[in-house]
Image (cartoon, rainbow, N blue to C red):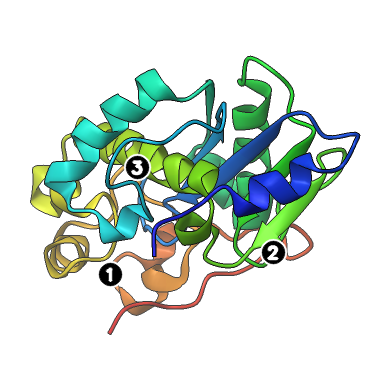
Amino acid sequence: MAPTYDIEHLLLAQPSTRTVAGVDEVGRGAWAGPVTVCAVVTDLSEPPSGLTDSKQISAARRTPLAEELAGWAAGIGFGEATHTEIDELGMTEALRRAARRALEALPVRPDAVILDGKHDYIGPPWPVRLEVKGDAASISVAAASVLAKVRRDAYMGTIGCEEYGFADNAGYPSPLHQEALARLGPTPHHRLSWSYLDDLPRWRHLKHHRDPLVGEGQASLFG
């Protein structure tokens, strides 16, 4: 089913809510590069054709759709947290910072936020409505998911490191990426606090050991 404005209308029915933003992130599970968050405000008009969860849209269609969304949305804000911030602060705090940067970049401050997922990583003072699979249910969140994905993928395609295939895998652990890591070690763009390094004896001395009181760990993904 295509996303709708049902959640937006529910929130806008509250007297104190005049503007609603949809928020989604991309890059949480990557081994390299930033995490990117997008916030989108709409005027509740009909969205460009084919809008849905970005994971359900081909790469060939996502880029032109993002261009359409850029001209259609009433407001778009992007925020990012670097791989260094992820290493120093943990993913939850990195997401919080990226999301707040995205919300603060909007042309108008939203009165409510629809956040994809089941964990509120934004926190006060933003009033957050959590929505599991929100990128498939809410038009605002779906737009944010597409815009975030296209922006981050485009960035990852510009940083080189061709042996790792970042232009194709965007820093996620593809077979090519894993092979290059085992052979060449991490690049300056890799997240060094993550436990994939535990599976690489030649390179595990490079692992960044974060203060256990800050952030959270990352499960090993090497198979």
Residue located beneath label 1 in the image: 202
Task: Give the camera-side residue of 147 and 179.
Answer: 147
Give the residue type that dot 3 points to.
His
For the residue pair 110 and 92, the one nearer the viewer reads as: 110
The part of the image, by quadrant, that contains residue 106 is top right
Residue 57 in the image: x percent, y percent? 24, 54
Residue to which mark 3 is pinned: 189
Q: Is residue 52 visible?
A: yes
Estimate the spatial distance between the alpha carbons at disc 2 and disc 1, rounded to whole Å. Answer: 36 Å
What secondary structure is marked by label 2?
A: loop
Q: Is residue 36 left or right of residue 7?
A: left
Read off the residue under disc 2: 119
The answer, for residue 35, to whether it is visible in the render is no
Closer-to-camera residue (84/149) = 149
What is the x, y in percent for residue 20?
69, 36
As drawn, the residue found furthest toward the top would be 107
Q: What's the residue at 74%, 50% (across, down)?
A: 10
Work out whether 101 lies above or below 201. above
CA neighbours of label 3 inside 10 A, class few (<14), some (14 to 19), many (20+): some
